[in-house]
Image: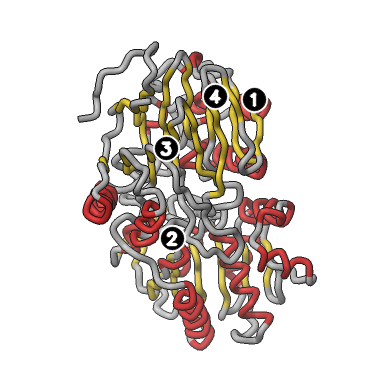
Amino acid sequence: MYNDSYMANDKNLKITFCSGAGTVTGANFLLEGNGKKFLIDCGLIQGEKFVDDLNWEKFPYDVSTIDILFISHCHIDHIGRIPKLISEGFRGKIISTIPSKEITEIMLDDTAHILSREVNLGLDKIYTEENIKKAISLWETLEYGQKLDVDGGFQFYFKDAGHILGSGMLNIIYNDKKIVFTGDLGNSPSPLLPDTDIIDDADYMIMESCYGDRNHEERDERKKKLEEIIKDNYNNKGTLIIPTFSLERTQELLYEINALVENNIISRMPIFLDSPLSIKLTDVYLKYGKYFNEKAKKLIASGDKLFDFPGLKETLETEESKAILSVVPPKIIIAGSGMSNGGRILHHEINYLPNKNDTILLTGYQSVGTLGRLIYDGAKKVHIMGEEIHVRAHVAIISGYSSHKDSDHLVEFVEKTAHTLKKVFVVMGEPKSSMFLAQRLRDNFNLKAFTPNAGESVTIEC
């Protein structure tokens, strides 16, 4: 079904799902046609470990022949193998939106620090400061809607995905056909970002499916849940620990806690942002406030500090982080990583998971095999950094904080262009999520919707 005939010199295009198909992470897609080769995303494959050993195998293409790498957004599962691409000889252009370039450099530096603890993987030759700087030197940027014409009859531009700051859907025009790589699609409406742009004229679509088989709570419901969890923690004189993704999730949480504190809806207590990466990225968010939605822009113009409020303390240094343990509860700790597969949150989980008065709040997707997924699934014992830890703390879950569209909204997104679509390829999701969404698209719109496997190729008739 997928390996249709293709010749490099014919008018058709070929897409190879190098990774990111049949799994949520590791987005990496190759588009070939008319003598040109383009990559869309080059992310880390993540699972039980922060990075899977599969990441360090040789790419299934000659990286020196790639003309352009397009980046949909700068989560590490979309950018994390860029240094490896450089180490294997890539010297083409890298193109993204303006905020994504700056955020990527921060994210790659942080990942290099995490991976510096790994041994026997040869990472010292891949995740080097030189490779990261080389990647940034090859980087060019586009504003949303700005067209880029490339020899061979290609035109590229980004539309706003509404997922995280700078996230874009890559639109490709070739022989009067439009191919759209959605990247990750935002859970609109967002407190900070504009809604996902409408696509209504795509011929082919390669789309994400992280939540393809389930829906989130409504925004008002998630705010109420957050308020109740914080109040319960205060009344229990407990510690609320929140493993969170440093990019987007942290900023949304700070924004909403800011409103709860400033409107005296919750009692004052120490709230720690215990993540150097989150602190750096929050500064970038403030720098690029022009990309926020109108409501957030008006709040900034009125003098509201969106991510700062009484009781908040940023703990950059390791000693500051360790000192949190001595602070008498009630208190709240926000720390990375979001799936508990690294970072300072692990130390807090060791300290607080065994206490029945404490709470761990999960606010985002937890990949299969991660510590966060074990806690999400109700494990009573987990192993953290070699220690067996009993989980006696209350486990709270708010799915509405996901920065991904849920199943119903993914279907609504496709509906706008269902009348023009010839084929949809559903990727970037666990198999059950991708297959469920593909079936919904077939049932609702009579679309040709496929769930390719990693390594498979398709021909796009142009």
Give the Cα separation between the discs numbered 3 and 1.
20 Å
Label 1 or label 2, whichever comes before in sequence order:
1
Rendering coords of residue 148 (x, y %)? 61, 30
Give the Cα separation between the discs numbered 1 and 2.
33 Å
Q: Nearer the viewer, mark 3 or mark 2?
A: 3
Three-letter amino acid code of the residue under disc 3: Ala
- Residue 27 image label: 3
- Residue 364 image label: 2
Nearest the eye: 372 or 90? 90
Please tell me whether mark 2 sits on a helix, a strand or a loop.
Answer: loop
Give the Cα separation between the discs numbered 3 and 2.
19 Å
Give the Cα separation between the discs numbered 2 and 4.
32 Å
Badge 4 density bin: few <14, some 14–19, many ≥20, Cα 10 Å: many
Give the Cα separation between the discs numbered 1 and 4.
10 Å
According to the picture, the residue beneath numbered tag 1 turns out to be: 138
Rendering coords of residue 288 (x, y %)? 71, 52
Please tell me whether mark 3 sits on a helix, a strand or a loop.
Answer: loop
- Whether 185 is drawn above or below 70: the answer is below
Please tell me whether mark 1 sits on a helix, a strand or a loop.
Answer: loop
Task: Tell me which residue sits at (32%, 59%) in the image.
Answer: 374
Nearest the eye: 73 or 325? 73
User: Is residue 257 something that shows in the picture?
Assistant: yes
Rendering coords of residue 190 (x, y %)? 55, 63
- Image-quadrant location for residue 410: bottom left
Task: Tell me which residue sits at (39%, 78%) in the image.
Answer: 356
Three-letter amino acid code of the residue under disc 1: Leu
Three-letter amino acid code of the residue under disc 4: Ile
According to the picture, the residue beneath numbered tag 4 turns out to be: 68
